Image (tube, grey):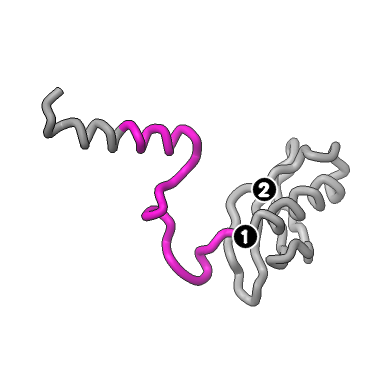
Amino acid sequence: MSRASRPLAISVLIGTVFAAFGCVAPSDHPSGGSSAGAPAEAEIACAKEADRYWNLKDGTAVPGRSKSTGNSLYAVNVTGGKHRGVCTVTEGGDVKDIMNR
């Protein structure tokens, strides 16, 4: 491998590792406003509430993608078993609603 091709090979390797683990590089995140994901506390609260809502064993539901909807509220996709839904939650973890999808 030539010296000139090493940076490209390293970039490809790093990109492959990020993709394999579902990670994105910081430059892949749009900046500002409504594109921000929910805080971890809010996502955990949604997963716990989804377990209760769908009568699942504790720890079954998991949060997925999330986004800000404004006014310190977030929409968090949750899945658990055969169930799918969207949880509306405050940044502090107060769940307002879960809607089945």
At 42% across and 61% down in the image, what residue appears?
A: 30
Q: Nearer the viewer, residue 8 or 55?
A: 8
Residue furthest to the top in view is 1
Mark 2 to mark 1: distance in Å?
A: 10 Å
Q: Which mark is residue 63?
A: 2
Q: Name the secondary structure under disc 1.
A: loop
Residue 95 got which mark? none
Q: Residue furthest bottom?
A: 71
Q: Sort mark 2 into few (<14), some (14-19) or many (20+) by Cα contacts within 10 Å.
A: many
Percent position (x, y) of residue 88? 71, 63
What residue is shown with label 1?
38
**Residue 29: x percent and y percent?**
43, 57
Residues 6 and 12: in front is 6
Q: In which quadrant of the rendered view does residue 70 lie?
A: bottom right
Give the vertical position of 71 relative to 99 (above or below): below
Direction from residue 88 to residue 22 in the image, left or right: left
- Find out whether residue 85 is within the magenta segment: no
The answer to if 18 sits in the magenta stretch is yes
Label 2 with label 1: CB-CB less than 8 Å: yes
Q: Is residue 16 left or right of residue 6?
A: right
Residue depicted at x 35% and y 38%:
15
User: In the rendered structure, which segment of residues is drawn in magenta?
Assistant: 13-37
- Viewed as shown, does residue 95 lie left or right of 20? right
Relative vertical location of residue 69 with respect to residue 58 in this rendering, above or below: below
Spot the residue most to the front.
3
Question: In screen coordinates, is 92 left or right of 18?
Answer: right
